[in-house]
Amino acid sequence: MDWGSLDLELIAMQLFSGVALGAVFVMLALGLSIIFGMLGIVNFAHGNVFMVGAYAGVFVMERTGSFWAALILGPLLVGALGLLVERFLIRPLAGRPPDDALLLTFGLGYVLVEGVRILFGSDGLPFATPEALSGVADLGVGFFPIYRIFVIGVVALVLVALWVGLERTKLGLIVRAGARDPEILRVLGVDIERLWLWVFGLGIALAALGGVLAAPMRSVNPEMGNVVLGEAFAVTVIGGMGSLLGSVVAGLLVGVVVSMTALLAPEMASIAMFAFMALVLLVRPQGLFGKPGLGA
Amino acid sequence: MQPLDQTVLATAPPVPRRSPLAGGALSRWRAPLSILALLALPFLLPSQALAVNVLIYGLYAVGYNLLYGYTGLLSFGHAAFFGTGAYVTGIAIGAYGLHPLAAMGLAVAAAGALALALGAVSIRSRGIYFAMVTLALAQLVYYAALQASAWTGGENGLRGFTVARIGLGRLAVDILNPLTKYFVVLAFVGAALAMISRILASPFGAVIEAIRESETRARACGFDVERTKLLAFVLSGLFCGLAGALFAIHLSIVPLDSLAYHTSGMAVVMTLVGGAGTFFGPFVGALAVLVLEDALSLWTPHWQLALGTVFILFVLFLPRGLWGTALARIGAMRGRP
Amino acid sequence: MTGPVLQVENLGRRFGAFSALEGISATLGRQRITAVIGPNGAGKSTFFNLLSGALKPTSGSLRFGGRDLARVPQARFAHLGIARSYQITTVFPRLTAHENVRTALQARASRYDFWSRRDRLAGLEDRADALLDSVGLAGRRGRPAAALAHGEQRALEIAIALAADPKLLLLDEPTAGMGPEETKDMVALLHRLAEARAILLVEHKMKMILGLSERILVLHHGRLIADGSPAEIQADREVRRVYLGQSGGYGHA
């Protein structure tokens, strides 16, 4: 490895790419964590929801010609699908061991992949970067693709909205209380089933938004979901299951680890995040921000 | 973990274990009976290649079931052991010219060693967390194999090794004949089944079931839960590695897919459809899934849509699986006066 | 073994900034029933978890038969002779009553034996039956634990604990959720068991405790506020104050 060629600008570029990549991981891990925190289940179709999100984006863009419509309608469509899944597939499992919901969503993954293959074909689809967001911008330390800056911005906006929603609204208070102790909500007379429904839909919509955002940056194909699932799990395990802060920090951290590995040892890039996860597990089995007891 | 134990108490209707048939003769003679049933298989299925696949995937699922059905650990990373068994067999034969039997022994040992390493990292995580961790660790192995293309052939899979005969010296048999191949593979699978049956009937088998039923109580009784789980994980890895080794011998190629998420998922699907925690259930599941694939893929490339749907229906309405439900029915019938 | 069974010295446990238990000292002799009482949140569960190894103390020491327990992992506690029951019945639900006890007996005999037949281990079958008989479950031998009545499950849990041949038996609310008949049976069982070992139990049924135990420890806000015979505890002003300050007071619960 020639360290002399690693000038500052290159490192800044990679760091920045890492943050953009990490921003997408954050969307995935947040969705997983929100659903887990509230419903106590892991969505094994999460990667495929991400994939369906990307296809929903393609679908809306083909119909309307507008990336902005795709960005908003895509996640909403998929989120609506999530509501149906919660209502008709997850809810009947109430009272069963938590493994059952996991297995069910795993089976759902097959259905989503084949459904997309039937509707859109088995080959990958191109998803062009919208014209208004193509090109590069000079940020002082170097030139960065505008689309990636945009992705980071959208994710930051979503985070702020989520934070305000959770910390500053009555609904947020209920959600936080419910994540700690669902019984409290029953006592207070909150309709917890309706809450579960909407929280599940929200988690799904976030993953789908991640899919739409990532579409111009990575290839869109029916198999991408299974790859993404492993990535989302690695990030969630590193951050600590159920911790929203953990999801954000771990998402960005993993993004940077991956992109820096890509710079130093490209052949190790795909392995890096999983090796990082194994390392974290050995040192802190509950993840960086997780509560002990769940992991170890 | 106490709330979880409560759920089990509340939701899992007890299987009457000591009923005369399900618990008695059927259980005592489960290994010979299973082998007997498998002896008839190639004459009942449309092709012998399909029958060999049922054997291999059946063993894979039985090995997986040792961990999921009997120890209660839901792993989503068992492709790592299946694939390692397959790759090590292929590389040992193709690149180093090892005798097929030696290659298979090496492959099983390698799968066991990998299980020890992955288990050491993952075994402390519980429940759904364990499922996520094992899935991610298996991805690590997958990408490692993809990168090490000089050894594994990368995306194209491993080629260039063919096993025509298997055995020692004059006792070697030609396995190019499909029916002969079936019975050679059955010899390995049958031996593995006899061993697994013995392990399940052993004191260790009782301990892993106890851990599945209540980790808290097992620990309070004085069992080292972590070490026992790790041992179960390694045992499971060994048998799945053997299944992988047989897979390599059978196909004469090792696709990269043998390490992929899809292959890990297959163990889960087959075990659950057949009946987790029953001895022969995983074979029934492997048979059902592979026959479904064989029949549907003639009609449509989208047969996995049916697979996913069937699997969801099983989770919702038949969580004990085909064989598990049948055993429970027999038990209930015999239990009634 | 002569001398005290258990020596607790200045025992404490913190969870972050919260101190659940502090400065507990007590010595337990052999063959008697000691009760631990206290209002909810007094630290009874933490105390039990420390004594059974489920938690490690953050201060003070525990000695069992003269041996320091500080570095002993939880799984070894049963081997040393400390066994427990849980507030929520914790048995192996889908195993039969007999398998429950026989498996527990294995913890001393064969933990990593992959090859012999589990139902042919010398002596274990008979000892499991004897233990079931001693808690009055001989007739339930082949029933899955989950199919037993609540009181029977509590008894089964005690049989499992007895498999460790404990010198100290920790029982967390052994009569919780039981009707008067079942409670009476349990009290009789506890008297029999106390003939051969020390029993420490947490209970809420005050009347029962006063009749059953020879000694009572009272916890309040993580501290030991009284330690004495039932008569002494009943007369203790501090205890009266703590309990009368609670809604419900004595005798109910």
Image: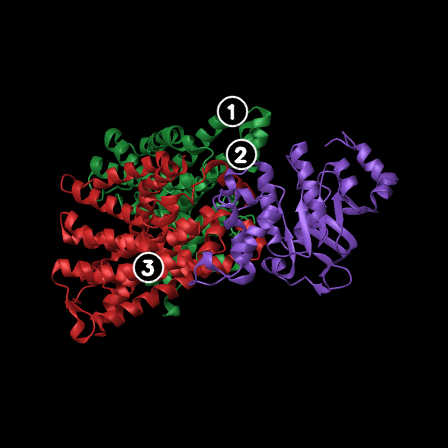
Chain colours: A green, B red, C purple
The relative height of residue C233 versus residue B124 in the rendered view (above or below) is above
- The chain under label 3 reads B
Relative height, residue A88 to residue A19 (above, below): above
Can residue B303 be spotted in the picture? Answer: yes
Q: Position of residue B89 (x, y in %)?
A: 25, 66
Residue B267 relative to residue C246: left or right: left
Tag 1 subunit: A
**Residue A191, numbered circle:** 1
Q: Residue B172 is drawn in which quadrant?
A: bottom left
User: Horizontal and vertical percent for residue A48?
Assistant: 32, 41
CA gap, disc 1 to disc 2?
Answer: 18 Å
Q: Nearer the viewer, residue B303 or C121?
A: C121
Disc sitting over residue B282 in the figure = none
Which residue position holds label 3? B194
Residue C151 figure quarter: top right
Of the image marks 1 and 2, the number of the one nearer the N terminus: 2
Disc 3 residue type? Ala
- In the displayed structure image, the side of residue B155 where residue A209 appears, left or right: right
Amino acid type indicated by mark 1: Asp
Residues flagged by tags 3 and 1 on a common chain: no
Nearer the observer: mark 3 or 2; the answer is: 3
Which labelled disc corresponds to residue A166? Answer: 2
Residue farthest toward the front in the current orientation of the protein: B337
Q: Is residue A210 visible?
A: no
Q: Kindly identify which chain the residue marked by label 2 belongs to.
A: A
Q: Nearer the viewer, residue B29 or A149?
A: B29
- Relative to B72, does residue A153 appear above or below in the rendering? above
